Image (cartoon, rainbow, N blue to C red):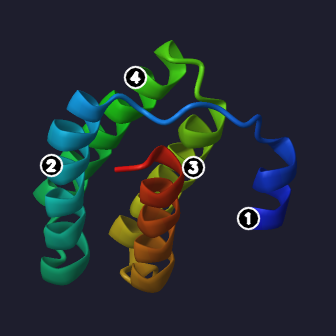
Amino acid sequence: MYVYLAAMILIGSSLSPAMAADGAAGLRAWIDRCVDLVDEQSCGSALQQSHRLKQLAEKQENYQCYTLILALESHLIMHSLDRNHRPETLAALGEAARVCRW
């Protein structure tokens, strides 16, 4: 899946420092709660926060970051459905953080 996404991604600039400070820290906290505590509310909050970050990436025309956040959202949804996607979710978070420079 990541090879396919990489082929489809345009290289964009990193997200703004202010966004990285607020949004990414909040997203990491919600994802940690979602995957560790198996808390539905935390998973929902993680999805809401990731959506905000995705919107910022889109406004900045940072399509590489946008696509990786979209993949992260997919893993969050799968994790909330069957709880067996923890490694994939955390890997997707790490990749998004690396590319988006959080």
Q: Which amino acid does label 3 sit on?
A: Leu
Q: Distance between the residues labelled 1 and 4?
A: 22 Å
Of callouts 1 and 4, the N-terminal one: 1
User: Is residue 84 among what the camera can see?
Assistant: no
Q: How crowded is mark 4: few (under 14 residues within 10 Å), some or many (20 or more)?
A: some
Left/right of residue 29 with respect to residue 59 in the rendered view: left
Task: Identify the residue position indicated by label 2 in the image.
Answer: 26
Q: Considering the numbered disc 4 on the image, is that residue within a helix, a strand or a loop?
A: helix
Q: Which amino acid does label 1 sit on?
A: Tyr
Residue 61 rendering spot, x and y as whole percentages: 59, 19
Give the quadrant of residue 34: bottom left
Task: Identify the residue position indicated by label 1 in the image.
Answer: 2
Q: Considering the numbered disc 3 on the image, is that residue within a helix, a strand or a loop?
A: helix
Q: How far apart are marks 3 and 1 (CA)?
A: 9 Å
- Relative height, residue 100 to residue 16 (above, below): below
Residue 24 rendering spot, x and y as whole percentages: 25, 47
Of callouts 4 and 3, the N-terminal one: 4
Task: Identify the residue position indicated by label 3 in the image.
Answer: 68
User: Residue 56 has which mark?
Assistant: 4
Left/right of residue 64 with respect to residue 5 in the rendered view: left
Q: Front-most of 45 and 3? A: 3
Number of residue marks: 4
Q: Front-most of 89 and 6? A: 6
Left/right of residue 46 with respect to residue 72 in the rendered view: left
